[in-house]
Amino acid sequence: MKTKLQVGLNNLLQGAIDLRPGQRVLLVQENPKFGWYDSQLPKALCEFAIDQLEAVVEVLEVEEPSNSANPQLEQMLKQQHWDWIIFLARIGDQDRFEVNHHGPGKLMTYTRTLEQLQSGLGTVPHAAMVALKTAVNDIFDNAENIEITCPFGTQLQGKAPQKIDQTATDVSVVRFPAAVSQPIPASTFSGRVAFRHGLAPTGSKVYSPACLSLPEGIIAVIEQGVISSFEGNDKDIGAVQDHYRKVAEQFNIEPWIVDSWHLGLHPATAFPLDPQVDLDRWSNTMFTSPRYLHFHTCGAYPPGEICGMVEDPTVKLDGEVLWRDGHLMATNFKALAKVAHYWPELNLL
C-alpha cells in the first residue's frame, strides 16, 4: 500500500503533469529560510521523480520574489531543453495570468510543506479537483445574476458575464492543487464588501509594506467595479486609502479598480496560525479555501496588486445557492452532484 507521501507525490507529478521517463525537469526551489517552503518537500520530490519516474531533475535555489527577472533562472531557461519547470517558489506565481505562454510546461505548487502534500490538500486526485473546478466554472457561465453576501456586511450584486474565455482569464501554468474557480470580471458589480482581517498582496509584484492589518475588517463600497469609498473607523479608513495610493503610485496603476474575483474550492485548505501572525502567508494560503472569496483590486488587470477577502460567503446564482456560509452546496446543482458521485474522495472532505 502506498504511503500518503507517495500518493501526494504521484498526484503532483503524474496526476497534474504526467511526468514521464527521460523528461527533463528544472525544479525551482525557494530558499527555506523565508519560511514559505520547507526543505523536505523538494528533496522528496526530486527522489521520487528520479527513482520512481526516471525523470532527469536539476535544482535551482532562488531567493524571495522581486520585481525583476531572476538572472539565474533566465539563463537556465535559455538552454531550451526543459520539458517542465516545477516551482516550489513564489516567483512561479508572478506571471500566472500571462496569456502568450511558450516554452516548457510550468507547474506552480501550492502545497508548500511535506505535511501539506500528505494531507487532503495534496492527496485528493488532481483530476477530481479539475472536474470540480470545471463544473463550478460552467455553472457561472450559465448564470445571469450573481448575489454575494456574508455575515460581516457584504451585499454585492452584479450581472454574470457571458461565457468567459478561460484562455484569457485563467492562468498559463498548471496549478497544484487546482483549487480556485475562474476569475469573474467585476465591472458590473455594485454594493458593499467586507474585507476581513486586512489587505495583502496578490503575489503579482513586490512592495513594502506588503500587508495592512485590519483586525476589525473594513467595508469597501463598490460601484460598477470601482471602489468609491470605505466604511469603518476613521483610522482604518485613512490607513487603507494611504495603502492603496502608495501601491498604485509605485506601479502607475489605477488604485480603485476591482478587476475580478474568485472562490476557493479546496476544503482541505488550512492555516494553523491566526491571520494577524503572518497576514501575507495566511492570505496566500487561504485563497484556495471555500471559506473565502478573493477580490483582485488595485489595477485594471488580473490579479491586480491588492487582495481583499470575504469570509464565509454566500453566493446565489439566479436565486439558487451555490455557496452558503463558506460551503459549496454540491447537491443544489446536478453538475456538482455528478462530480461528487464520480469522485467519492471529494465527499470525504
Image: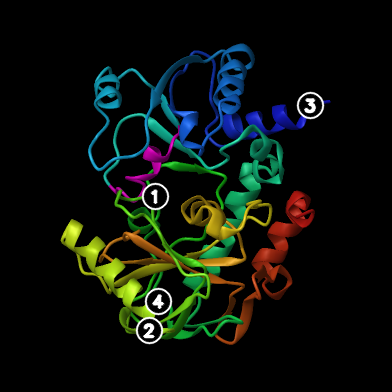
Who's the residue at 79% across and 53% down the image? 348
Where residue 308 sits in the image (x, y, percent)? 44, 67
Cα gap from disc 4 to disc 2, whole angstroms: 6 Å
Tell me if I can see residue 134 in this picture: no
Would you say the residues marked 4 and 2 are in contact, meaning their CB atoms lie under 8 Å apart?
Answer: yes
Residue 330 falls in image quadrant: bottom right
Cα gap from disc 3 to disc 2, whole angstroms: 56 Å
Identify the residue under disc 1.
171
Amino acid type, mark 1: Val
Q: Which residues are magenta?
A: 88-99
Which numbered tag is attached to residue 236?
4
Cα gap from disc 3 to disc 1, whole angstroms: 32 Å
Cα gap from disc 4 to disc 1, whole angstroms: 33 Å
Identify whether 218 is placed above or below 97.
below
Residue 93 falls within the magenta-colored stretch: yes
Residue 183 falls in image quadrant: bottom left
- In terms of sequence position, does the residue under pointer 4 or pointer 3 come before the other? 3
Where residue 203 sits in the image (x, y, percent)? 38, 50
Identify the residue under disc 2.
234
- In terms of sequence position, does the residue under pointer 2 or pointer 1 come before the other? 1
Where residue 14 sits in the image (x, y, percent)? 59, 30
